[in-house]
Image (cartoon, rainbow, N blue to C red):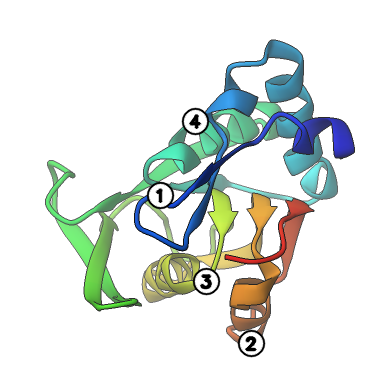
């Protein structure tokens, strides 16, 4: 884990002053680091029946697609509003100032299918909780969520757990 953590670039004051942005693109660009991260994200779910990985836009697509391949299951994109070409269902979630919305195709997950949520980072948990609500709306079963980075000071893992979803994180960075 410490080797993977060294592959994360920290960018101060992005996207605004006081924020320390944790950039996974440096991890994704390192062939061995990327391979190790995918293996570690998938490992706890290797023996769990999973029908699909739901990846949250945008870095969750990269990671989720690779995890789905590793687990031998399908992939479901969860996108920002207005980006999917077919009939969608959506879920709003709170931002620091206002709300946003994510969507997925209404037929992407069938009743009873077992789904793993994947994204690069969990902060407050708002996006992941919204994804869980979408999956449950179509009667999918959530087997868990996996993230490369947890920002524990923001409480996302705990909020997701309170929403009934256990999380697996490869590393944590203190602070915002």
- Which label's residue is closer to the chain start, 2 or 1? 1
Query: Residue 116: where, in percent of width, then height?
Result: 60, 54
Along the line of sight, the residue nearer the viewer: 115 or 130: 130
Residue located beneath label 1 in the image: 14
**Residue at horizontal 29 percent and vertical 49 percent from the top:** 79
| Distance from the alpha carbon under mark 1 to that under mark 3 | 19 Å
Q: Is residue 13 above or below residue 65?
A: below
Q: Are marks 3 and 4 in contact (CB under 8 Å)?
A: no
Q: Residue at x 77, y 32 (%)?
A: 6
Residue under circle 4?
62
Q: Position of residue 124 (x, y in %)?
A: 52, 73
Few, some or many residues within 10 Å of mark 1 (<14, 14–19, 20+): few
Residue at 66 percent of width and 15 percent of height: 30
- Label 2's element? helix
The answer to whether any part of residue 117 appears in the image is: no
Q: Secondary structure at mark 1?
A: loop
- Judging by the rendered image, the residue that carries numbered circle 3 is 125
Residue denoted by label 2: 162
**Do labels 4 and 2 touch, CB within 8 Å?**
no
- Mark before the other along the chain sequence, 1 or 3: 1
* Mark 2 Cα-neighbour bin, 10 Å: few <14, some 14–19, many ≥20: few
| 140 sits to left or right of 67 | left
Mark 2 vs mark 1: in front: 1
Q: Dividing the picture into quarters, in which one does residue 57 lie?
A: top left
Q: Is residue 32 above or below residue 171?
A: above
SS of the residue at dot 4?
helix
Element on which disc 3 rests:
loop
**Residue positioned 19% across, 58% down in the render:** 88
Q: Mark 4 or mark 2: name the one nearer the start of the chain.
A: 4
Q: Nearer the viewer, mark 1 or mark 4?
A: 1
Q: Earlier in the sequence, mark 1 or mark 4?
A: 1
Number of numbered tags placed on the structure image: 4
């Amino acid at each position: 884990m410490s080797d993977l953590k060294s592959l994360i670039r920290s960018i101060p004051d992005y996207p605004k002053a006081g924020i320390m942005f944790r950039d996974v693109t440096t991890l994704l660009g390192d062939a061995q680091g990327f391979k190790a991260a995918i293996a570690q994200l998938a490992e706890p779910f290797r023996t769990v029946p999973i029908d699909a990985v739901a990846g949250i836009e945008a870095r969750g697509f990269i990671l989720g697609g690779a995890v789905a391949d590793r687990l031998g299951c399908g992939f479901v994109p969860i996108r920002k509003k207005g980006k999917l070409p077919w009939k969608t269902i959506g879920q709003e979630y709170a931002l620091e100032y206002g709300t946003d919305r994510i969507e997925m195709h209404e037929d992407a997950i069938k009743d009873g299918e077992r789904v793993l949520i994947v994204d690069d980072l969990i902060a407050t948990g708002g996006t992941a909780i919204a994804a869980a609500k979408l999956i449950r709306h179509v009667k999918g079963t959530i087997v868990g969520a996996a993230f490369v980075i947890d920002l524990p000071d923001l409480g996302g893992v705990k909020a997701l757990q309170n929403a009934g979803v256990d999380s697996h994180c490869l590393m944590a960075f203190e602070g915002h």
